Amino acid sequence: MYESPPHPRQHPAVPDCEQQPQFTAVPPPALWRYKPRRAWWRTRAVRAGAVITALALCALVILAIVRDQTGTQGFLVGLGLAGLPVPLLASAFRWLDRVEPEPWRNLAFAFAWGAFAAALVAIVANSFATRWIATATADPAGAESLGATVIAPVVEESAKAAAILLIFLFRRRDFTGLVDGVVVAGFTATGFAFTENILYLGNAFGEDQEAGVSGLASVTAATFFVRIVMSPFAHPLFTVLTGIGFGLAALASPRGGRWRRIALPLLGLVCAMGMHALWNGSAVFGGLGFYLVYAVFMVPAFALLTWLAVWTRQRELGTIAAELPAYAAAGWLLPAEPLALSSMRARSLARGAAARRYGSGAAGRAGGRAAARAVAEYELFATSLAFLRHRAHRGALGPDFTAREQELLHHLWQRREVAGPALEYAARAAGRVRLPPPRPPAWQPYGYAPPPHRDYAAYNPYRQQ
């Protein structure tokens, strides 16, 4: 094993696989993650409690403000309608993050920050700035227009970017690339749009109640069509540009790349503000300007960013296929495992196979969900190992590389008896590895039977029970 991390310009060697490896960097009681000793005020429980308390206070304040502006009925109507696009957007970003899923606690924090903290900052700062401009210029109409096109984009995008910055700084291990930036930004903006839609839809419902209008001709229906049907992706699209900047900063190497870690997020934030200002300004130009900006700019930008995110995910799978064979050659993985881990279909097949056919380990004997969970954890740790080595090859080798590598290998070793056979079966079933020619069955009860899987009878889905 390593005694000290290699020089950043050198490719780190893969440690040899031993029968009973001893990991000096990982304490024996650790079953999940390496936990260094810290003072009590720096423990995870204290920090989590402080963050939850702060976000809960922000939630109480912002929801009280929105309810005061919309009324109780408007608040409830806005709450019900604003929640409709949230599961769709969250599922889309979660699907994009399937290769190395971001921990749910990070995504929950990002959504809560956008929905409560960022929304509170935005509504207070926007109102104060608009009133100050109206008082200074004696032009309330011009102040509203200036506030929507200049003040709001700067304030709102800065408030949403704060969540990405906090995760980038304090959850750096989980923030490794462009996809992580896109997903964190998407969840933050989805939460912000949720609270903002409650306000807009609630106010629209109140106007309809005062005017006695209902149905498709109502302001509520028009607001719902514009904000929920046509442009539910607007806020995520703006903030994703900031997330891309942070994602590129995460990929920047330490050698001469420090300025990039500062410049790239700022550039992404400026682009997000500019796109947001263009979108808000389109409403000032009237209906024709709105549809022109939507068709010519927003839809192509959304399609381009979607393609970029999907392409980046495919590159991540390519990184897994390129980095893990070194560990297979050293004996840590079976030869077919890198091929299975670089295919989303094979990963799914492995989890399903483990749930139906059990391995020889403790989770394997338990079977069912326990075995499938062990395979899912194995896939996650192997993916993190591939990305860790890829960053080392690019020169972004941190001082904790050795401890982190040993930690990940430790967790892989604990789950290999269950996950190894399942992943090798999945590689063959998904066509990643050529299957051996099947032997003709000795007995066919009804004149036909699928060929048995010669080498992996325990994982053969056609095996007689």
Image: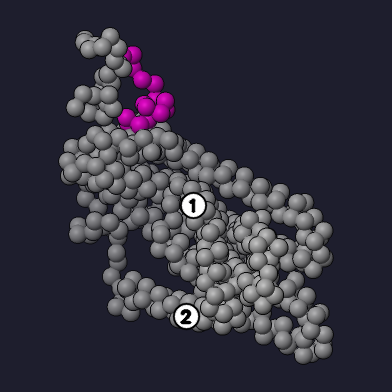
The residue lying toward the viewer, choosing from 33 and 311, is 311
Q: Which residue is mark 2?
A: 60
Q: Position of residue 12 (x, y in %)?
A: 41, 46
Query: Residue 149: in sight, yes or no?
Result: yes
Query: Residue 119: in sight, yes or no?
Result: no
| Residue shown at the point (44%, 38%) measured from the top left | 344
| Residue shown at the point (55%, 63%) measured from the top left | 81
Does the stretch in magenta take in 429?
Answer: yes
Instruction: Work out how far the residue at label 1 is from the one at label 2, CA to CA, in angstroms.
Output: 27 Å
Classify mark 2: helix, strand or loop.
Answer: helix
Among all residues in the image, which is located at the extreme front? Answer: 212
| Residue shown at the point (53%, 59%) measured from the top left | 84
Q: Give the residues drawn in magenta, as a range.
A: 424-438
Q: What is the quadrant of residue 200 in the picture?
A: bottom right
Q: Earlier in the sequence, mark 1 or mark 2?
A: 2
Q: Position of residue 301 (x, y in %)?
A: 69, 51
- Of the 4 image quadrants, the one containing the C terminus is top left
Q: Which residue is mark 1?
A: 91
User: What amino acid does circle 2 point to?
Assistant: Leu
Q: Position of residue 315 (x, y in %)?
A: 53, 42
Q: Is residue 113 left or right of residue 23?
A: right
Helix, strand or loop for the magenta stretch, by majority? loop
Q: Tags 1 and 2 in contact by the CB under 8 Å rule?
A: no
User: What amino acid does circle 1 point to?
Assistant: Ser
